Image (cartoon, rainbow, N blue to C red):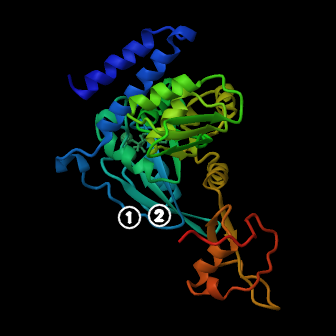
Amino acid sequence: MGILEKISEIEKEIARTQKNKATEYHLGLLKAKLAKYRAQLLEPSKSASSKGEGFDVMKSGDARVALIGFPSVGKSTFLSLMTSTASEAASYEFTTLTCIPGVIEYKGANIQLLDLPGIIEGAAQGKGRGRQVIAVARTADVVIMMLDATKGEVQRSLLEKELESVGIRLNKHKPNIYFKPRKGGGVSFNSTVTLTQCSEKLVQLILHEYKIFNAEVLFREDCSPDEFIDVIVGNRVYMPCLYVYNKIDQISMEEVDRLARKPNSVVISCGMKLNLDYLLEMLWEYLALTCIYTKKRGQRPDFTDAIILRKGASVEHVCHRIHRSLASQFKYALVWNCGFNTTYTPLPP
Ligand SMILES: Nc1nc2c(ncn2[C@@H]2O[C@H](COP(=O)(O)OP(=O)(O)OP(=O)(O)O)[C@@H](O)[C@H]2O)c(=O)[nH]1
Ligand SMILES: [K+]
Ligand SMILES: [Mg+2]
């Protein structure tokens, strides 16, 4: 049996297994198996053709945003609107076949925007250019999931499922579980909170499935078995995602209103250039970038030249951006109106 068949067998079994106390362990085990097969599926295949030409775009600028969506939702139209790069747009599906980079200049930052081919159901298993697209998505700082406002919600959940199945976690934080395999001593299990979804026995079972017999596990949060598996597997990507509903020129005001109220969502029309400014504001927020301006003694700051860093960056990060020798000679900094961490925390080596 091929991996795909095994995956589908397990998925079917999970679907037909009733969720209750008696089946809890069985389900946990199935999920662990499922995650294992998916991981195998994602291992780069030996044949060179799967790599796909036209997808290895260099990272550049201060941040990277990937455009993910079904065909013909308006991704290329959006790239051409927001950047000085033109990406061919047309009414037929799969107009775009490679990764097309553009740059959005905003608040002095250069944000790399990547137009990508449309993806469809089954993308994660290699349908269309799904795998290449998803591989690019993993390298982004934020994903814009572009949706056609005239089409149903099913698009959104299908794409979420595709990304989920390859270990991309949208708008979720890393589960707060301490996990450390060790040489001996069995599994030591502890939790600082009451657990309603996992138990020591279930954790043991899942670990055994991964052939881990010695480890330290500490739950600091009431996590689910899936979240625990994510921690064991380890290569998950936790990524902010903005759901962008395009083509609102085609739907009623009531419908626009309904979509706009959904969490993490923005409504736009590329055709009529509606709400694009607001989308940029939201994107900026999701990228969590901050502008730092330097000033000379007795002079006003130079607001035309910002140092762009992630929120949470330290003064040391700023030093490194200015000159790599600055941090070692650094004595103190005067910081105004800061959205960033002013304590001096040495960078990891
Ligand atoms: N009505 C309307 N049509 C739009 C809007 N934005 C894009 N379109 C149209 O939608 C069609 C598809 O646009 P593309 O930009 O090619 O879509 P895409 O997502 O890049 O498509 P693929 O590259 O094939 O995946 C084109 O005919 C566009 O003119 C919009 O806001 N409103
Ligand atoms: K198209
Ligand atoms: Mg396109």
Give me the residue at 36% from left, 19% from top. Answer: 10
The answer to whether residue 241 is left or right of residue 10 is right
Q: Is residue 95 visible?
A: no
- Residue 206 screen position, x and y as percent: 46, 28
Mark 1–mark 2 Cα distance, whole angstroms, equals 18 Å
- Residue 78 screen position, x and y as percent: 49, 49
Kindly report which numbered mark, 1 or 2, lies closer to the viewer in this rendering: 1
Residue flagged by tag 1: what amino acid is it? Met
Seen from the viewer's position, the closer of residues 185 and 81 is 185
- Residue 268 screen position, x and y as percent: 60, 42
Residue flagged by tag 2: what amino acid is it? Ser
The answer to whether residue 264 is left or right of residue 165 is right
Mark 2: few/some/many CA within 10 Å (<14, 14-19, 20+): few
- Where 14 falls versus 62 (above or below)? above
> Do the numbered discs 1 and 2 sit on residues whose CB atoms are within 8 Å?
no
Seen from the viewer's position, the closer of residues 96 and 194 is 194
- Which residue is outermost to the front? 185
Give me the residue at 78% from left, 68% from top. Answer: 338
Give me the residue at 29% from left, 43% from top. Answer: 43
Quarter of the image that includes the N terminus: top left
| Residue 190: assigned label | none
SS for tag 2? loop
- The residue singled out by tag 1 in the image is 58
Mark 1: few/some/many CA within 10 Å (<14, 14-19, 20+): few
Seen from the viewer's position, the closer of residues 253 and 234 is 234
SS for tag 1? loop
Q: Is residue 8 visible?
A: yes
- Where 299 falls versus 155 (above or below)? below
N-terminal label among 1 and 2: 1
Give me the residue at 45% from left, 42% from top. Answer: 184
| Residue 84: assigned label | 2
- Residue 165 screen position, x and y as percent: 42, 33
